[in-house]
Amino acid sequence: MEIDNFKLVDAGVLREQEMLALLRSGQYPSRNPEQNMGDLKAQIAANEKGVQELRKMVDQFGLDVVQAYMRHVQDNAEESVRRVITRLKDGQFTLPLDNGAQIHVAIRVDAASRSAEIDFTGTSPQQVNNFNAPKAVCMAAVLYVFRTLVSDEIPLNAGCLKPLKVIVPEGCMLNPNPPASVVAGNVETSTCITNTLYGALGVMAAGQCTMNNFTFGNARYQYYETISGGSGAGGIYDAQGHLSSGFDGTSVVQTHMTNSRLTDPEVLEFRFPVRLESYEIRDGSGGPGRWQGGNGGVRRVRFLEPMTASILSNGRKVPSFGMAGGQPGQVGINRVVRATGQVEQLDHIGSAEMASGDVFEVHTPGGGGFGAA
């Protein structure tokens, strides 16, 4: 369902019944509108808290002072990124996705003006699947990557983007036209954009190019989680652009665009009719290199009553790339182990009807290695 510009709060009054009616409408209505409404109320409350705190700050310091410091924060971020740009070199990279699409980026550095052009021309046209990403997601990935290049402790803000010209062709999968489906853009494609940018910069091997989105449910229960994998190893360069040192990837960690945490096992098993059989490091899945890629993980969930389970992922066909002579990590695996012992392999996108006693296994990808061993 696509919700086009619905007014959620009118003159300070929450339009709850109208929103619930909207969520229950359409060809594919929400399974649990009340739960969705709870999420929306939490977002409204968070925004209201932000408004209150900003007003307190203005009352204490004055509007002119607050606005001045907001400009100072952005100016400082801009200058920090400009200093980093002078140490970068031109580069380009193409990252293939499991579904056959690709993300391409070229980074062109203008050292004289201390600016850079980030050009996604060559990226696949918008897809008939849901791996399209709104342009805002692409811009967020660019902002994130260039912020990570800054060693200074600066808050993430739009000032980081001022030295950057970002070209995202209209109609490509990173800037699609309506009514393109974009549900995987924020979770899957964003991680792929991030890794593509690091590939073009040449500073770090790929972490898992996926968030391993695992969902299950029935008429009563609905659950969603993202699952950690291996991060990429990388190199540290001095001011002259020479490799001075490096670092290993980290095993079973949420990488880059994923900022979510897993539900505690006790809470998961208390609230849902499932059992977390095991969650362990997938030894040997990180890419070899002078600096080793991080290992992925293996997560096994046993179902105690019938449900539908689904996986939305990437990195099941295309591995996390290595960099500077490092080797790629192992690809991920999705499969179902039936109570009878029968094993069913799933693709990077898959769904299965789970019976009581069946186990859903997710083997997450390892990160790429950096440098020749």
Image (cartoon, helix red, strand yellow):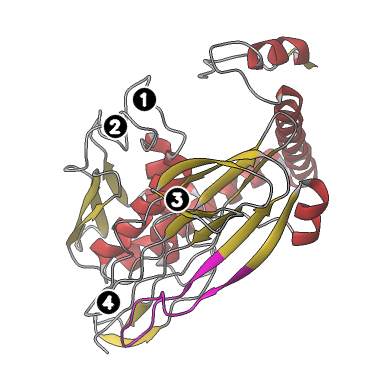
Outermost residue on the right side: it is 270
317 lies left or right of 214: left
The residue type indicated by label 3 comes to Gly
| Mark 3 Cα-neighbour bin, 10 Å: few <14, some 14–19, many ≥20 | many
Expressed as whole percent of the image width and height from the top left, the position of residue 207 reads 40, 65
The residues tagged by marks 4 and 2 sit, at their Cα atoms, a distance apart of: 30 Å
Which element is circle 1 on?
loop
Disc 2 target residue: 127
- At label 2, the amino acid type is Gln
| Region of the chain picked out in magenta, as a range | 279-298
Q: Which secondary structure, mark 3?
A: helix
**Proximity of marks 2 and 1: CB atoms separated by less than 8 Å:** yes
Nearer the observer, 8 or 312: 312
Of the numbered discs 4 and 3, the one sitting upstream in the chain is 3
Categorize mark 1 by other alpha carbons within 10 Å: few (<14), some (14-19), many (20+).
Answer: some
Proximity of marks 4 and 3: CB atoms separated by less than 8 Å: no
Q: Is residue 345 left or right of residue 357?
A: left
Image coords of residue 208 (percent x, y): 41, 62
Distance from disc 3 to disc 2, alpha carbons, whole Å, reads 32 Å
Establish if 336 lies above or below 3: below
Residue 116 in percent (x, y) is at 25, 55
The residue beneath circle 3 is: 159
Vertically, is 234 above or below 83?
A: below
Q: Which numbered mark, 1 or 3, is in the foreground of this view? A: 1
Q: Looking at the image, is mark 4 or mark 2 earlier in the sequence?
A: 2
Q: Secondary structure at mark 4?
A: loop
The residue beneath circle 1 is 180
